[in-house]
Image (spheres, rainbow, N blue to C red):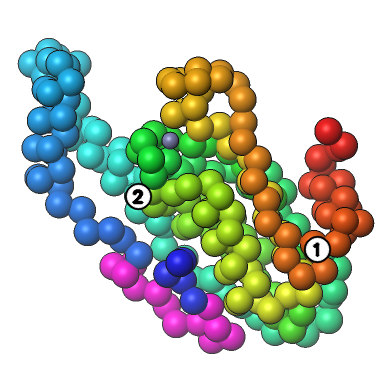
């Protein structure tokens, strides 16, 4: 579940409620122990500070940036597709804690509520800043749009390269994974096709 709940008068979400509890010292000790157990020497000029750098990097990837998902009444009565295209994100694969990096198209057909435009990108980066599974991330974004905006339809298409797939294991360098969710009237095949055309995704 996403921790962010929007209303017409959104409460300011305290940053502390979004941030994971990170014990810097314990994490550095554990990172040093992990690297040592993996046979990585920590007494060279380039690796002396590596446990601390690792912790800082992971902490950053696991910490959502604070934002308020402002939802407004749809006073103009705009009913056509609102689409944020190719919004970049980085997340951590929950299975390997290696990054997966990609872009998402997020769109909805407004009902009575609309979302501040920049918030689609914020929503994505917030949902990505945790150990994630791409399929789950895609569903969570769709769930959030559906429950918070009560739109006529919503869709999320996520395409990402998973380092756990491309750098190791299958070694499928350069390959990407695409997941999608189609809600309400955007589940209709013609609406899907229009969504993909607007997103700049030609027939594949
Ligand atoms: Zn993985």
Respond yes or no on whether mark 2 lies under 8 Å from ligand 1. Answer: no
Q: Is mark 1 within 8 Å of ligand 1?
A: no
Q: Quadrant of residue 150?
A: bottom right
198 vs 150, left or right, is: right
Mark identifier at residue 186: 1
Q: Nearer the viewer, residue 54 or 34?
A: 34
Among the 4 quarters of the image, the one containing residue 200: top right
Count every numbered label the image shows and give the total: 2
Percent coordinates x, y for residue 36 in the rendering: 11, 22
| Magenta highlight on residue 16 | yes
N-terminal-most mark, 1 or 2: 2
Residue depicted at x 23% and y 39%: 55
Most common secondary structure along the magenta stretch: loop
Which disc, if any, is residue 60? none
Closer mark to the observer between disc 1 and disc 2: 1
Label 1 element class:
helix
> Over which residues does the magenta segment extend?
6-17
Q: Which residue is mark 2?
A: 62
Secondary element at tag 2: loop
Residue that extends furthest to the right in the rendered view of this protein: 190
Residue 188, x across and y down, in percent = 86, 62
């Amino acid at each position: 579940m996403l921790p962010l709940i929007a209303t017409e008068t959104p409460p300011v979400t305290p940053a502390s409620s979004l941030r994971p509890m990170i014990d810097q010292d314990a994490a550095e000790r554990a990172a040093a122990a992990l690297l040592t157990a993996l046979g990585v020497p920590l007494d060279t000029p380039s690796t002396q500070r590596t446990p601390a750098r690792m912790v800082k990097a992971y902490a950053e990837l696991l910490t959502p940036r604070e934002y308020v998902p402002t939802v407004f009444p749809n006073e103009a009565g705009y009913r056509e597709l609102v689409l944020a295209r190719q919004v970049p994100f980085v997340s951590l694969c929950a299975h390997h804690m290696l990054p997966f990096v990609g872009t998402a198209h997020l769109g909805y057909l407004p009902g009575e509520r609309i979302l501040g435009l920049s918030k689609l990108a914020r929503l994505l980066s917030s949902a990505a800043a945790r150990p994630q599974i791409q399929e789950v991330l895609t569903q969570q974004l769709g769930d959030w749009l559906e429950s918070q905006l009560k739109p006529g339809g919503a869709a999320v298409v996520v395409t990402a390269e998973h380092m756990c797939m491309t750098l190791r294991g299958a070694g499928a360098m350069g390959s990407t994974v695409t997941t999608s969710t189609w809600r309400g009237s955007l589940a209709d095949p013609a609406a899907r096709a229009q969504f993909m055309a607007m997103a700049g995704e030609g027939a594949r």
